Amino acid sequence: MSAIDRLLSNYSRQVRLPWSANMSGKQRVWFAVYPPTEERRVRARLPQFEALTLAANHAWIAVDLTRLLPEFLAAHKYRESVFQNPRYLRAGSDLELSAAALVKDACSREEADAASVVALTGLASLFDFMRVSSLIELVEDSVPGRLLILFPGEYAGNVYRFMDARDGFNYMAVPITSTESFINP
């Protein structure tokens, strides 16, 4: 079984479990963790994640952050200077706020309720420009159902490492891995 097949299988089990309504925002976040080299394969199989979610009687709302950085740069008032000397770009908090606004907008849609999954993709395109942990802290209390983070990186000992490069962060999210059957309610 491939890593993506295992990830889909583990996600299927997780999304079918009963959902507690009395959970904090931090506990309503799911990380679908897979090797960064599998990013394109995971993205190609997003329709299967959606189908599994719908089969479990949950709504699916997708948020793709892939275009966020180029759109942010195109609108930046100093874009010409940034393109001439990119090392001076300090997008961090502004980019995180823009990403958070997209996620919060999805969470406030009519179809977003306590039984919905908001799926966040495209984080790899923001690598080295913002921290995933900061983004999650900005949006966790806005999530009515579950927030599924498609996370290219690794998970070990309650620590998530984005793109296998940054120092890890300890987060209370539920890990759904591509390597083992690890399921939490």
Image (tube, rainbow, N blue to C red):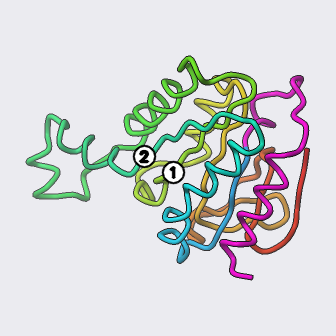
Q: Under tag 1, what secondary structure?
A: strand
Q: Is residue 114 left or right of residue 87?
A: right
Left or right for 57, reference 17: left
Point 51% across, 51% down: residue: 121
Q: From the image, tell me which residue sits under label 1.
A: 121
**In the image, what residue occupies the spot 74% across and 82% down?**
1
- Residue 150: x, y in percent? 60, 55
Q: In the rendered structure, which amino acid carries the disc numbered 2? A: Leu
> Is 19 contained in the magenta span?
yes
Q: Percent position (x, y) of residue 152?
A: 58, 64
Across and down, in percent, residue 142 comes to 63, 23
Which range is magenta?
1-29
Q: Is residue 123 magenta?
A: no
Residue count near mark 1 (Cα–Cα under 10 Å), binned few <14, some 14–19, many ≥20? many
**Residue at 42%, 54% in the rendered image:** 126
Q: Quick check: 54 above or below 8?
A: above
**Mark 2 residue crowding within 10 angstroms, few (<14) / some (14–19) / many (20+):** some
* Residue 24 located left or right of residue 164: right
Q: Nearer the viewer, residue 39 or 77?
A: 39
Tell me, yes or no, whether the two marked residues, 1 and 2, touch with CB atoms within 8 Å. Answer: yes
Rounded to the nearest whole Å, what is the CA distance between mark 1 and mark 2? 6 Å
Residue 31, image x and y in percent? 70, 52
- The quadrant in which residue 19 appears is top right
Q: Main secondary structure of the magenta part?
A: helix
Disc on the earlier residue, 1 or 2 = 2
The dot on residue 65 is 2
Q: Quadrant of residue 135?
A: top right
